[in-house]
Amino acid sequence: MDTLVNVAHGFGVALLPINLLYCFIGVFIGTLVGVLPGIGPISAMSLLLPVTLSGTPESGIIMMAGIYYGSMYGGSTTSILVNIPGEAASVVTCIDGHQMAKQGRAGPALGIAAFGSFAAGTFALVALMLVAPKLASLAIAFGPAEYFSLMVLGLVVLTFLTQGSMPKALLMACIGVVLGLIGLDSITAQPRLTFGRMELIDGIGLVPVVMGLFGVAEVLLNTEQAIKRDVINTRITHLLPSQEDWKASAGPVGRGTILGFFLGILPGGGAVISSFASYALEKRLSKTPERFGHGAIEGVAGPESANNAAAGGAFIPLMTLGIPPNVVMALLLGAFVIHGLQPGPLLITQNPGLFWGIVASMYIGNVMLLILNLPMIGMWVQLLKLPYNILFPLIILFTILGVYCSSNNVFDVYVMIAFGIIGYFMRKLGYEPAPLVLAFVLGPMMENNLRKSLILSQGDLWTFVQRPISAVCLAFALVLLIAPLLPSLRKKRELVALDEGA
Amino acid sequence: MNNDTNVKLRLSNSELWGGLIGLALGGFVVWSGLRLKLGTINDPGSGYVLFYTGILMCVFAGAIIVSAITEGGPTLASRWENVRWSKPLVLIACLTAFAFALEPLGFLLSSIPLMLLLLRLIDPVRWTLAIPIAVLVPLGMWWVLKRLLLIQLPSGLFGIG
């Protein structure tokens, strides 16, 4: 009953005209960046982070969340019609989605991607409503040792799933922690790694780092190659899948939804890994696995549902524990912090309007996305023809302005350009930026919790092992750290490794 | 990878360079941690986490170096093989020049040439389209930010913008 009252309260917040507008802007921009290859939700969210300053916390966070799950919808359009994933979670959709489009079945492919995404998004939201408050009440029992160990686990999971060698990903995570510690020590107020520059006393901002590593570096990488696009030019008809298509897709949608939701909750997991896992599961369960790769609708329905369910599930650790499970959620945490809010166990009780408003807005956003992605599909197809030689300079200009407006400080523009150049060379040498960014956000929290737990336990390191939740997290982290040393597990890791930056 | 692009103990091994840079950074972080004072395990100081993170960086960088020497790695040149490497280089040069010009020249006088250069140098856009975009987009953004959102953009020594 309480949940229903809260949901009604949430809809009251989400249906305010200003919040509806922000929600629409969010899902529209999300679909846009999902459709356009080369710009992912991370770049778009970092670009718009300063915009959240102008409105209420609800409006800003509703918009940011809309960009994230909107991009999951939009990504499938490009995968199906152009065979280029609009964002990393849609890589798998290219395999069967584009084959379906080539066979003249672009309509059902787009239709099942949208309906599957809607069903998964709805399930994820209902689960979020039911799970989050319960988990939040449990999370109050979390002490600094549990928080520290959970963050270590999150970082290790992400480094485990990142493409390339594990030592490289771990090195990136360590660099992220160090960058996060620049500025005044929160306990002793001693300046650290500031090199005498006043601009560094408050530390490096998240916006210039993310915009540099994901925005500018992405453009630099994209300019290396002339992007060729093979857009399906035939008229897209029959967006409603046939009865046979529904029959074939019902199971994959259901399984993808549940799998995606649970993988989304895991720290370090997320939409990308869940779409790959769903594709592998459907192929394994299929009686005719040979159809996969040649236009099997199950290969579109499962992964597309999984990535949308994961997008919903990823909100759980952020909202209940205050720990972002992936880079996108780290940016959302940034939006909370900008407004002086701290997501965590007390958010739901202290700011029920905010929590339930965001959840309700996500449901409204899902309905908006269904309308945006099906009847208006022609508009997105036209957008796929936008020339990149005009788009890239515009992105550069917007990132410069976005960074400047977030702090009114030219120094941040320098930081962004520097991180853009560093990010380009990092990618060229096979170093992924995702662990760096997550560690950059988690670094100060990890340090704080480590120092607190050491002070509380009077320097007894066993405190991390004696507390059950902490011990389980550290044990999992240890297993993942050792796993790549075993050849059979190393191969498996390479199979599931993902490119978060895409 | 053939023998020309996969090398072991050679200066052109890109993996080796990556590891060495990581090691140098790790060493610097360890030194910074020590300078900031470690404190004790009962009461960790400002440099405590930095020091141990630096040690971890050295360990991971060491693992990268060992792997580069034993398994080899692609040469630096092969990382830029078959790509238009000059394009990002031009873009980096433009962005660096822009960074130096932003404060003395102001937003408008630095961003209009930047846009024009980017539009003409990445994949050349014809002049008749490049000039209006390069002028109107920064001008439009400046107007929206300065007049509508009241955000002060750098106006430079000439006070333009």
Image (cartoon, helix red, strand yellow):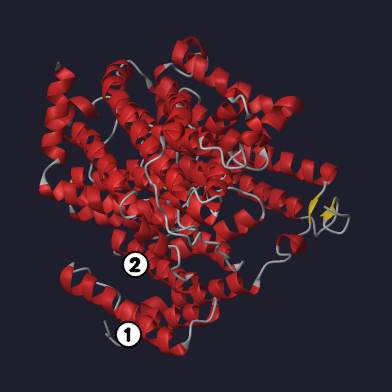
Q: Residue at x 34, y 27 (%)?
A: A321
Residue on which the image places disc 1: B157
Identified by mark 1, the residue type is Leu
Residue on which the image places disc 2: A401
Same chain letter for marks 1 and 2: no
Q: Is residue A188 above or below residue A125?
A: below
Q: Residue at x 25, y 36 (%)?
A: A363
Mark 2: few/some/many CA within 10 Å (<14, 14-19, 20+)? many
Q: Nearer the viewer, mark 1 or mark 2?
A: 2
Identified by mark 2, the residue type is Leu
Q: Residue at x 29, y 80 (%)?
A: B139
Mark 1: few/some/many CA within 10 Å (<14, 14-19, 20+)? few
- Could you say which is closer to the camera, residue B104 or residue A434? A434
Q: Position of residue B75 (x, y in %)?
A: 78, 58
Query: In the rendering, which numbered label is found on residue B128?
Result: none
Instruction: Specify whether residue A118 is in view.
Output: yes
Q: Secondary structure at mark 1?
A: loop
